[in-house]
Image: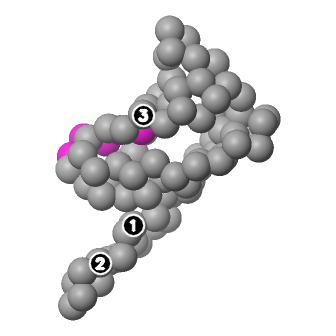
Amino acid sequence: MYLTASTDPATPGVTRFSNDRYCCVFIHWRNISTGAAGIAYLRHTNVDAHTGSGTEVATVTPPDGLPGYPTLMLLPGAGAWTVP
């Protein structure tokens, strides 16, 4: 599964995280220009995060699985981009 971070100059300070299928992951983001940080929970195909303008970095992790159903992440994700 691939996760995309996108921005739009019409909505400054907002990053949209999206993918092409249903998934549940945590996106841990940090604005390294301002120091702001947060966690976005992607439950469906997209979620908007109010990250503020500047240079952003993020990592992706799966939530804990239900008892007896462990989660598995083969390749952790990370990225960096600029938000208008």
**Residue that mark 3 sits on:** 48
Residue 78, position as x, y percentages in the image = 56, 53
Residue positioned most to the top: 10
Tell me the CA gap for discs 2 and 1: 8 Å
Quick check: 34 left or right of 82?
A: right
Q: Nearer the viewer, residue 54 or 79?
A: 54
Query: What is the magenta range?
Result: 17-21
Compare marks 1 and 3 and give the one earlier in the sequence: 3
Tell me the CA gap for discs 3 and 2: 24 Å
**Majority SS type along the magenta span:** loop
- Say which quadrant the C terminus sits in: top right
**Residue that mark 2 sits on:** 65
**Mark 1 Cα shell of 10 Å, populated few (<14), some (14-19), many (≥20):** some
Residue 1, position as x, y percentages in the image = 31, 53
Residue 36, position as x, y percentages in the image = 70, 42
The three-letter code of the residue at mark 2 reads Gly
Tell me the CA gap for discs 1 and 3: 18 Å
**Residue that mark 1 sits on:** 62
Quick check: 20 left or right of 6?
A: left
Residue at 30%, 58% (x, y): give it: 24
The three-letter code of the residue at mark 1 reads Pro
Which element carries disc 1, helix, strand or loop? loop
